[in-house]
């Protein structure tokens, strides 16, 4: 067990608190580096989606987790980044240029969305971002001269340094992994800066932040712009991975899935964005397992306990019908969110912190260690 005593400001903002972090993350990075050469193409493809969703999760974490501004419109920012890449590809613009252009344009749009959102909070801000997502989806469907409407747009293979990088190649995996690492490191440095500390102050109490001289409106717009820009970058990678985009791919459900990423992973930790992305990517294989394998397994168990052939066939059909029911995915999302809100509000990363602390303090661990204190300062009443 190791206890760290911070004695100055440098200790507080250090990127790696001690050498153990370097060993842990170095080992993880080494495993990720060899993954595309030892794992199947399907698993590597799923890891690519984990990287892309984690990038979006980090961007949303800046806005929601660290600034306290709710958003259900990040699918629109993802769409803007994807369509910017598709449009500029038609004019043979190189990848680095349209990649940066997508992030810049999405950041500008995010700032424009942030200005009217300054007067809104809570559920009203959520409604405003949902409206923005619907507007973008409608524009993508109607502006056929640019977006090709509902016919969608094909995405050419990425050209990087004069070399074609296929969406299924290890090179594309390393591009996504590299940008995820850069995004996490950049966000960590942002949070250690005065700007990041201002974001957190606004999240904790806008009244207290104003009293400290923080320009709340300016930093809210900055948060929207940074979050949108990161999501726009992810949109370019998303478009290249799918090789085809259409308005139906960027719906409100996708925005809800991004919220699930940070809710289940952990709202106040960048680790949570990665954990939530892993969870989100695992949902579809889990549903496939329920549909294809579970009916046979349950029917086999019933046969083992002496059920007749007709009963076994009936059980198999009923389980298959339930596993194939429309809306099952949404029901699973809802159930998992409710369970996490009730029993683990800090998400998967919060559960990991509790497990780690349990072993650190064993046998002196107390269950009330993470219990929220019901003590509020007066400024919180006027937040």
Image: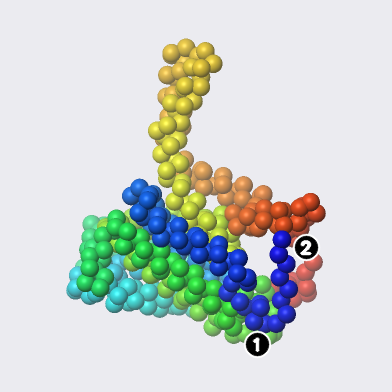
Task: Give how far across and how far down residue 254 sits, in percent.
Answer: 43, 56
Q: Is residue 252 visible?
A: no
Provide the residue designation for mark 1.
213
Q: Residue at the location (62% across, 47% down)?
A: 339
User: Image height check: is 201 above or below 234?
Assistant: below
Label 2 Cα crowd, 10 Å radius (few <14 / some 14-19 / many 20+):
few
Q: Quadrant of the C terminus?
A: bottom right
Left or right of residue 217: residue 50 = left
Task: Give how far across and how far down residue 206 sits, in percent.
Answer: 65, 77
Q: Is residue 213 visible?
A: yes
Cα distance in 3D space between marks 2 and 1: 27 Å
How is the model colour-coded? rainbow
Extreme residue in the bottom direction: 213
Q: Quadrant of the N terminus?
A: bottom right
User: Quick one: SS at disc 1?
Assistant: loop
Left or right of residue 87: residue 264 = right
Cβ atoms under marks 2 and 1 closer than 8 Å: no
Residue depth check, mark 2 versus mark 1: number of the one nearer the observer: 2
Q: How many marks?
A: 2
Label 1 Cα crowd, 10 Å radius (few <14 / some 14-19 / many 20+):
few
Provide the residue designation for mark 2.
373
Task: Give how far across and how far down residue 304 sits, in percent.
Answer: 51, 17
């Amino acid at each position: 067990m190791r206890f760290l005593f911070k004695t100055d400001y440098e200790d507080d903002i250090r990127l790696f608190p001690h050498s153990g972090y370097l060993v842990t993350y170095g080992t993880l990075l080494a495993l990720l580096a060899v993954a595309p050469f030892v794992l199947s193409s399907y698993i590597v493809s799923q890891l690519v989606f984990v990287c892309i969703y984690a990038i979006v999760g980090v961007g949303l974490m800046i806005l929601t987790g660290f600034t306290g501004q709710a958003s259900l419109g990040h699918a629109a920012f993802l769409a803007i980044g994807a369509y910017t890449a598709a449009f500029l590809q038609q004019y043979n613009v190189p990848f680095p240029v349209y990649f940066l252009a997508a992030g810049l344009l999405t950041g500008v749009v995010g700032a424009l969305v942030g200005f009217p959102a300054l007067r809104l909070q809570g559920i009203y801000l959520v409604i405003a971002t949902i409206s923005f997502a619907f507007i973008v989806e409608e524009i993508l469907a109607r502006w056929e001269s640019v977006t090709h409407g509902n016919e969608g747009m094909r995405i050419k293979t990425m050209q990087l340094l004069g070399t074609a990088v296929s969406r299924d190649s290890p090179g594309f995996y390393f591009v996504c992994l590299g940008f995820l690492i850069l995004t996490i490191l950049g966000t960590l440095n942002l949070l250690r800066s005065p700007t990041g500390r201002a974001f957190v102050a606004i999240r904790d109490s806008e009244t207290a932040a104003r009293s400290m001289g923080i320009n709340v409106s300016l930093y809210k717009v900055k948060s929207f712009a940074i979050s949108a820009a990161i999501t726009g970058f992810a949109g370019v990678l998303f478009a290249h991975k799918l090789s085809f985009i259409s308005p139906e791919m960027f719906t409100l459900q996708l925005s809800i899935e991004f919220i699930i990423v940070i809710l289940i992973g952990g709202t106040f930790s960048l680790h949570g964005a990665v954990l939530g992305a892993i969870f989100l990517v695992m949902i579809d294989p889990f549903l496939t397992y329920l549909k294809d394998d579970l009916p046979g397994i349950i029917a086999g168990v019933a046969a083992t306990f002496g059920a007749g052939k007709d009963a076994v066939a009936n059980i198999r059909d009923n389980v298959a019908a339930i596993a194939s029911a429309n809306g099952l995915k949404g029901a699973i999302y809802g159930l998992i969110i409710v369970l996490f809100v009730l029993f683990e509000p800090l998400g998967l990363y919060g559960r990991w912190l509790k497990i780690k602390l349990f072993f650190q303090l064993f046998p002196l661990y107390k269950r009330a260690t993470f219990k929220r204190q019901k003590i509020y300062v007066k400024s919180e009443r006027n937040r």
